[in-house]
Amino acid sequence: MGQRRLMSDTAENQAEYPQHSNQKPGCGFPIAKMVVLFSLLTGAVVSAGIAYESQQ
């Protein structure tokens, strides 16, 4: 299970996490998708990943 987060509209975030192709340039915020795998035994983070939002 994952979630999405809006991030600050900075040049660095725009370069790393681009907007949807259907948005006009300069409109909206970069969106990152995050997935975290937790251990049921200890509650520790076993693995995590962050990727940019893309349309397939």
Image: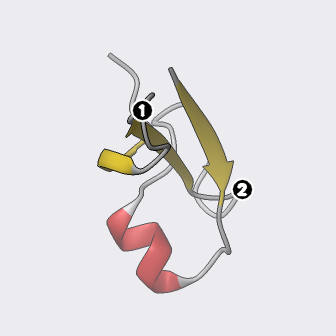
Q: Where is residue 13 in the image (x, y as percent from the top left)?
A: 47, 73
Q: Is residue 18 above or below residue 46?
A: below
Q: Of helix, strand and loop, which one carries label 1?
A: loop
Q: Which mark is residue 9?
A: none
Q: Position of residue 8 (x, y in %)?
A: 68, 74
Measure the C-alpha gap from mark 2 to mark 1. 43 Å
Q: Few, some or many C-alpha atoms within 10 Å of disc 2 (few <14, some 14-19, many ≥20)?
A: few
Q: Is residue 6 above or below residue 56?
A: below
Colour style of the rendered protein structure: secondary structure
Of the image marks 2 and 1, the number of the one nearer the N terminus: 2
Q: Which amino acid does label 2 sit on?
A: Cys
Q: Which amino acid does label 1 sit on?
A: Leu
Q: Which residue is drawn at 65% across and 50% down?
A: 5
Q: Position of residue 43 (x, y in %)?
A: 50, 43
Q: Name the residue under label 2.
A: 27
Q: Mark 1 points at which residue?
A: 41
Q: How many marks?
A: 2
- Answer whether residue 36 is visible to the viewer in this image: yes
Position of the C terminus, as image quadrant, is top left
User: Nearest the camera: 26 or 51?
Assistant: 51
Q: Which residue is drawn at 65% across and 74% down?
A: 9
User: Nearest the camera: 38 or 19?
Assistant: 38
Can you tell which quarter of the image residue 41 is in? top left
Q: Residue at x 50, y 38 (%)?
A: 20
Q: Which of marks 2 and 1 is in front?
A: 1
Q: In this view, does 31 lie above or below 29?
A: above
